[in-house]
Image: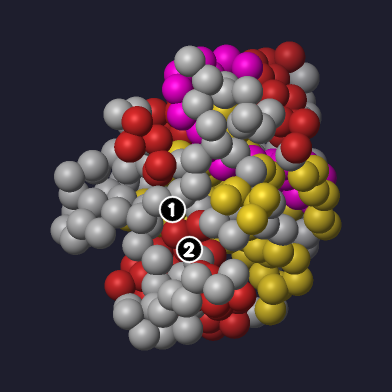
């Protein structure tokens, strides 16, 4: 049965569970000048749904990372809103490993296409997939997940939000009114040693301004740079800061700003699942 596109919905349950499982990976892609170390941190919105609606992956050997965010409105139709994002991520990883076996370079658009066509369950999801090849970040993005590149403490690139109207993101899914990978934005950005990539679902970007994220990364580079788990620790620090903001009923978050522009008159943060992946660009 076809299901219309669904707006994202908030759930007001208190959070008392945190999933701290994460990977820290040092990648190797031949004789290129740079490599990535990456780590992740995930905070589900509610302890009653510990898997949440977000999903993510870090593929170590293939230097590829990705996030997906299931659209919460499906829960009103009795559908697990996170099942689609989890299957999409699983199928993306399978595609990445298959590409690695066939040729060296990973094509994120091909990954997104294969993951989409192999995901058959009900639901819908945003998605962002990124790979590093020869000092070039090649990414594809659908919806309001995304990434920033921070250099010397300043954001030098931020992926664009894809939405049809406020809080109504482009979303991959099997319904006739849902989107397919043809809507994906394809991105290529040159990176250099020392850059920090922060990839996340909208649980971060709705609650943390770019200027706040710059400070978090600058401070993290000073406080955590000697630790072998720097990407994971910084991802945790960023996610917990976003969680704090999401609970506020008064601060001026990005979500509050956009709500007011859309005449929705919202104050404070937006409660949501929060997934953060940090990738540090290092010399080879």
Q: 10 Å neighbourhood of mark 1: few (<14), some, or many (≥20)?
A: many
Q: What is the span of residues highlighted in magenta in the rendered image? A: 117-140
Q: Would residue 235 be found to the left or right of residue 178 on screen?
A: left
Q: Which residue is mark 2?
A: 204
Q: CA distance from mark 1 to mark 2?
A: 7 Å
Residue under the point 40% across and 43% down: 72
Residue under the point 45% across and 59% down: 203
On residue 20, which mark appears?
none
Residue under the point 43% across and 53% down: 275
Q: Would residue 74 be found to the left or right of residue 106 on screen?
A: left
Q: Secondary structure at mark 2?
A: helix
Q: Is residue 150 within the magenta segment?
A: no
Image quarter for residue 61?
top right
Q: Magenta span: helix, strand or loop, mainly?
A: strand
Image quarter for residue 86?
top left
Report if the CB atoms under discs 1 and 2 are less than 8 Å apart: yes
Q: Which residue is mark 1?
A: 275
């Amino acid at each position: 049965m076809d299901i219309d596109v669904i707006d994202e919905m908030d759930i007001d349950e208190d959070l008392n569970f945190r999933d701290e499982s994460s990977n820290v990976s040092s990648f190797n892609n031949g004789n290129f000048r740079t490599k990535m170390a990456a780590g992740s941190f995930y905070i589900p919105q509610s302890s009653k749904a510990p898997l949440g609606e977000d999903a993510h992956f870090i593929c170590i050997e293939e230097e590829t990372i990705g996030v997906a965010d299931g659209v919460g409105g499906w829960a009103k139709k009795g559908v697990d809103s996170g099942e689609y994002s989890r299957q999409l991520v699983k199928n993306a990883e399978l595609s990445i490993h298959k590409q690695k076996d066939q040729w060296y370079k990973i094509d994120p658009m091909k990954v997104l296409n294969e993951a989409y066509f192999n995901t058959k369950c009900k639901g819908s999801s945003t998605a962002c997939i990124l790979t590093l090849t020869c000092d070039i970040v090649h990414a594809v993005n659908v919806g309001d997940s995304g990434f920033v590149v921070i250099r010397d403490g300043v954001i030098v690139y931020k992926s664009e939000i894809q939405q049809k109207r406020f809080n109504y993101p482009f979303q991959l899914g099997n319904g006739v009114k849902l989107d397919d990978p043809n809507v994906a934005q394809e991105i290529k950005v040159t990176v250099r040693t020392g850059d920090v990539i922060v990839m996340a679902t909208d649980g971060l970007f709705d609650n943390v301004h770019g200027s706040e994220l710059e400070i978090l990364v600058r401070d993290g580079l000073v406080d955590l740079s000697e630790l072998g788990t720097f990407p994971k620790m910084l991802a945790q620090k960023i996610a917990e800061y976003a969680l704090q903001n999401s609970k506020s009923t008064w601060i001026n978050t990005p979500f509050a700003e956009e709500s007011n522009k859309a005449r929705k008159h919202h104050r404070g943060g937006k409660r949501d699942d929060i997934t953060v992946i940090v990738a540090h660009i290092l010399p080879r």
